[in-house]
Amino acid sequence: MNPTTSLASRFWAEARRPRWIAVLVLSLALAGGFAAFAQWQLARSVENTEVVDIDTESAVPLTDIAEPGRGVTEAQVGRIVTVTGRLVETDYVRLEPRSLDGRPGSWLVGRLLTDDGVSLAVALGFLPDGAAAGEPTIDRTEWTGRYLPSEEAQSSDFEEGQFSAMSVPALLNVWVEPGAVYGGFLIAEGPPPGYEQIVAVAPEREVTLNLLNLFYAIEWVIFGGFAIYLWYRLVRDAVERQEEEGAEDVSAATVD
């Protein structure tokens, strides 16, 4: 007789006993429960990947979405905002090198002092290399533009005494008595004469899968498979014990 076939036959003969059928039903119930937990965790993982649809193109007052002294949140990034205030004439800074449509140049940056007395960094316009522009004369109080998070300062900004990054913390070192400051900056619409509009597009929000919930879902699937395997292992152990007991009986009979 084929040992493998014989073992399989003995296994299924043992598995059909009422107690093992009851254990199988319990194992299947546990596996079903684990599968339900896995489905729930998977659903949570999918729910957490949904991106909130934020209307970035409808202008809202900056004071409605942001507070001074705080960083820019995901819900604030790229919003078109309005703000009222005047530029501080002594606090203009040029950022270079910057580029626009592949052309090298510089940004003109100013400090806007809002009507509430809060400082806001404003990117006013782009000046290509080789172009000439006099001292800006900007007499306006109504501002509209895209609100973005501060860039990280570059080491060259401090070593060479010039600025290339739109870093709000770095600008605080050159502004005179800035007081309360917004954590982000504004790319203003409507550049000064001689300057070009800085392009600012709405940010693309990435969809990322919640790996923690996905990991939990996989864990529950493994637990469900283990419940079925445990039933199989218990039946298999019972068959092997029967074989060992049968071998011992044969050995004892031979000795007698």
Image (spheres, rainbow, N blue to C red):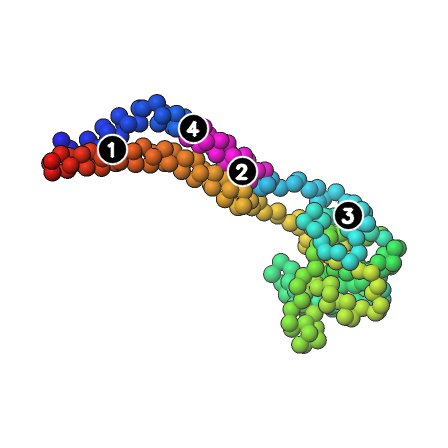
- Residue at 53 percent across and 46 percent down: it is 211
Where does label 4 land, which residue? 26
Task: Report helix, strand or loop for mark 2.
Answer: helix
Q: Residue at x 68, y 53 (%)?
A: 200
Q: Nearer the viewer, residue 63 or 21?
A: 21
Q: Residue 212: horizontal and vertical position, in percent?
A: 54, 45
Alpha-carbon neighbours of circle 2 within 10 Å: few (<14), some, or many (≥20)?
many
Task: Calculate the distance from the C-alpha at mark 1 to the C-alpha at mark 3.
Answer: 74 Å
Image quarter in which the C terminus is found:
top left
Amino acid type of the residue tagged 2 in the rendering = Gln
Residue 240 or 153: which is nearer the viewer?
Answer: 240
Q: Position of residue 62 (x, y in %)?
A: 79, 50
First of labels 3, 4 by sequence position: 4
Which quadrant is home to the N terminus?
Answer: top left
Q: CA distance from mark 3 to mark 4?
A: 55 Å
Whether residue 247 sits left or right of residue 24 in the image: it is left
Choose top left, top right, bottom left or bottom right for residue 196: bottom right
| Closer mark to the observer between disc 4 and disc 1 | 1
Secondary structure of the residue carrying tag 4 is: helix
Q: Main secondary structure of the magenta part?
A: helix
Residue at which label 3 appears: 65
Q: Secondary structure at mark 3?
A: helix
Q: Is residue 108 visible to the viewer in this orientation of the structure?
A: no
Where does label 2 land, which residue? 41
**Magenta-colored span:** 26-47
Q: Give the vertical position of 227 relative to 119 (above or below).
A: above
